[in-house]
Image (tube, grey):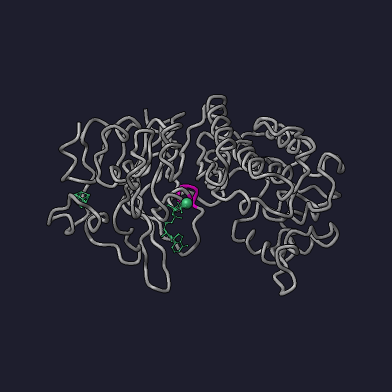
Amino acid sequence: MAPLLDVCNLRIEFATAQGTVTAVRDVSFHIDAGEVLGLVGESGSGKSVSALALLRLLPPQARIRGSIQFRGEELLALSEPAMRHIRGAGISMIFQEPMTALNPVMRVGDQIAEAVLAHSGAEAPSHREADAAQLKLRPFKADGGVSALHKPPSFEQDATDVAQPIGLLEQGEKQIPRGLKPARDDKNEEGGAAHAGAKAPDEREAGTADLKVRPFEDGKSSPAIKITKQDAWRLAVESLRTVSIADADRRARDYPHQLSGGQRQRVMIAMAVVNRPSLLIADEPTTALDVTIQAQVLDLLAELREKFSLAMLFISHDLAVVSLVSRRIGVMYAGNLVEMGSASDVFHHPAHPYTRGLLNSVPTLRTDRGRPLQTIEGTVPSIVALPPGCAFEPRCASRIASCAAALPPLIEVAPGHLARCPVVATEVH
Ligand SMILES: Nc1ncnc2c1ncn2[C@@H]1O[C@H](COP(=O)(O)OP(=O)(O)OP(=O)(O)O)[C@@H](O)[C@H]1O
Ligand code: SF4
Ligand SMILES: [Mg+2]
């Protein structure tokens, strides 16, 4: 059976003032339906950039090459409206920083409801439009600062301030039946101000947004469902219950700053699963949390995976956490996938010197407390000047002369166990 996600020879470059930098090169992996693939690697190794590329959320200066197939469909060739449907309803993502990923001036329930409405056929603004809206919305004045950013603008000022400059009002008027109120619509993807100080949708006039589903540009239609704002709000509250937020009805009306770090992460998860995607990308979902909350979030993800048969790309720099949730693990180093195999292969028979170094540097109960912890000598090469050969070569105790000449290929050291090191791979198993 074809995999749910099939990534082949992914290469991601950014045009920068210093020239073109390669953040990811020759990365290939697949994820089957319902499977969890863990991706580990130190900071800057290209984990988030790879994840964002799957959703085509990289900035315009990024150039993506290779192939990303989701359910057999090439995502890099999809139209933007079709891609917007994939985001959330097919693949969704829990972003690395919940506080910056959530809109600070929008109630969390509205943010989740907006994700529902975005997939009911309503035309949500593009991310660039949303960015533009955000720039208009945020008072970047000398006296503005963070408090100004968090201060909800008044309802009267907001919708027109945000929507008019980016043409959303005109767009909204075309889609919403006459006599309704597009200026106060929830469609603005970024428009937190459109909700600040406003009543929750279930308290607003009924039928404010009875949005019909329209075909996508590529001719494919989404299911013929009709979602009202009230339905979207109810689904948002339900989704908060699914992620075990106590008193979900009330908490849905809170702003992100009124929630704890763990609750914000749950809100992000609620938003990610509300449209029942088949693949969830979780980018460091537990890094900012203390260990007890970390365990709760991991349990929650496992529960959701079971309940919704979710496949997952679980990204972390923490080997222990990845080993708890993943059946297979990929190890990244300087934009390269250097090892891929079952969790047992990677932990018990590591085939790449970098993976071995990583495992040796993790203290265990058997670690001699009297000796200093092991580290990997040297530093990761800058992506501005990557060596032509193995990127780990300057730090590798096993290197031979040919290692610096050309990028080593991924070698199958055992069925399903691959390593980008022709020197050490033969010793394994
Ligand atoms: N817009 C950009 N322009 C130029 N370089 C970028 C851009 N975005 C990311 N990069 C570079 O790409 C590389 C990979 O970044 P990425 O965010 O994927 O790292 P990561 O593995 O997720 O690290 P962390 O564990 O710290 O989250 C980094 O060197 C980063 O500086
Ligand atoms: S290819 Fe050579 S330098 Fe790279 S990890 Fe293997 S032995 Fe070390
Ligand atoms: Mg990252």
Q: Which percent across, then down, holds residue 137?
A: 72, 64
Q: Is residue 54 magenta?
A: yes
- Residues drawn in magenta: 52-56
Judged by its main secondary structure, the magenta piece is helix
Q: Residue at x 70, y 40 (%)?
A: 212
Question: In which image quadrant can residue 87 be found?
Answer: top right
The picture places residue 233, in percent across and down from the top left corner, at 75, 38
In this rendering, position of residue 426 left or right of residue 172: left
Q: Nearer the viewer, residue 373 or 399?
A: 373
Residue 413 location, x and y as percent? 20, 35
Residue 202: percent from left, percent from top: 83, 39
Q: Residue furthest left?
A: 401
Looking at the rendering, which quadrant does residue 363 occupy? top left
Q: Nearer the viewer, residue 317 or 421?
A: 317
Q: Residue at x 40, y 53 (%)?
A: 46
Q: Left or right: where does residue 106 sit relative to residue 389?
A: right
Q: Given the current orientation, which residue lies at the most extreme front position?
A: 370
Q: Is residue 374 above or below residue 17?
A: above
Question: Does residue 98 sit above or below 20 in this rendering?
Answer: above
Q: Residue at x 34, y 37 (%)?
A: 367
Number of marks in the rendered image: 0
Going by the image, does 236 lie left or right of 280? right
Question: Residue 189 versus residue 93: which sits nearer the camera?
Answer: 93
Q: Quadrant of the N terminus?
A: top left
* 335 in the magenta segment: no
Q: Is residue 173 above or below residue 34?
A: below
Image quarter hosting the C terminus: top left
